[in-house]
Image (cartoon, helix red, strand yellow):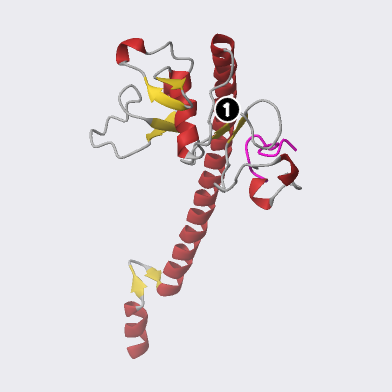
Amino acid sequence: MNFAANQTQRTVKGFTLIELMVVIIVIGIVGGIVFSGAGYLFEKQAIKTTQAQIEVLKVALDEYKREFGNYPETVDFKGKESGQILLHSLFGTHEFNDDEWTRLEAEDYRRSLIPLENLTFLPLADDSSGKFDPREVDNYLTDPWGEPYIYEFPRKDGNRGILLYSKGPDKQSEPFTDFEDVPDKRPEDLDNIPSNEPGNW
């Protein structure tokens, strides 16, 4: 009698506790597989998006060079600030004068060379208005992982042309400051997009 009572207490809606535990474990395993698969798909899509965005930016930078004689200069700016130069020089809201970038008057904005709807950007400083509008506040271009695109011209590593790349999924990388300082590829640069930067390996 006691045995039957115990068996009754150990069932829930027709399932024994062992059966319920098995179901929970299976759900956990399936959930883990789905989550891992979703993460993998997101990363693959993010890589494709980054590659496409970099190609768009390269075309725009070449167009900028044709119009103004050279690529937008970063001087000593890096990180978010170089991402700001990359965005606003191509968007036409800023101009380079006396070794610094300044915002033009709205009526003097130049033709935009980039499709903003296909790019991601964030405000350089707190934007209390919440508009994030590059026509009104300074923003910087980001990759799909929320990191600023690394842009540099002239390059400090001695290579010709522009430096433009994403740090990739691990969000880690630093450009080189000297041509002699370009060693074998660093572990943090293995997932950079494109893979030959920042050292032009």
On the image, which quarter does residue 152 sit in?
A: top right
Q: Quadrant of the C terminus?
A: top right
In the image, farthest residue toward the left: 129
Q: Which of 37 and 147 is in front in this view?
A: 147
User: As drawn, is 29 to the left or to the right of 199?
Assistant: left
Q: Main secondary structure of the magenta part?
A: loop
Q: What element carries label 1?
A: helix
Q: Is disc 1 surrounded by few (<14), some (14 to 19) or many (20+) residues within 10 Å?
A: some
User: As drawn, is 17 to the left or to the right of 166?
Assistant: left
Q: In which quarter of the image is the N terminus?
A: bottom left
User: As drawn, is 183 to the left or to the right of 105?
Assistant: right
Where residue 82 sits: x, y (%)? 50, 34
Where residue 164 sits: x, y (%)? 60, 31
Residue type, numbered disc 1: Ile
Give the number of callouts.
1
Q: What stretch is highlighted in magenta?
A: 190-201
On the image, which quarter does residue 193 sit in?
A: top right
Can the viewer see residue 107 in this picture?
Answer: yes
Q: Eyeballing the image, is 109 above or below 16?
A: above
Where residue 23 sits: x, y (%)? 46, 63
Q: Nearer the viewer, residue 142 or 80?
A: 80
Where residue 160 sits: x, y (%)? 70, 27
Q: Nearer the viewer, residue 106 or 3?
A: 106
Q: Which residue is drawn at 37% across and 80% down?
A: 7
Provide the residue designation for mark 1. 54
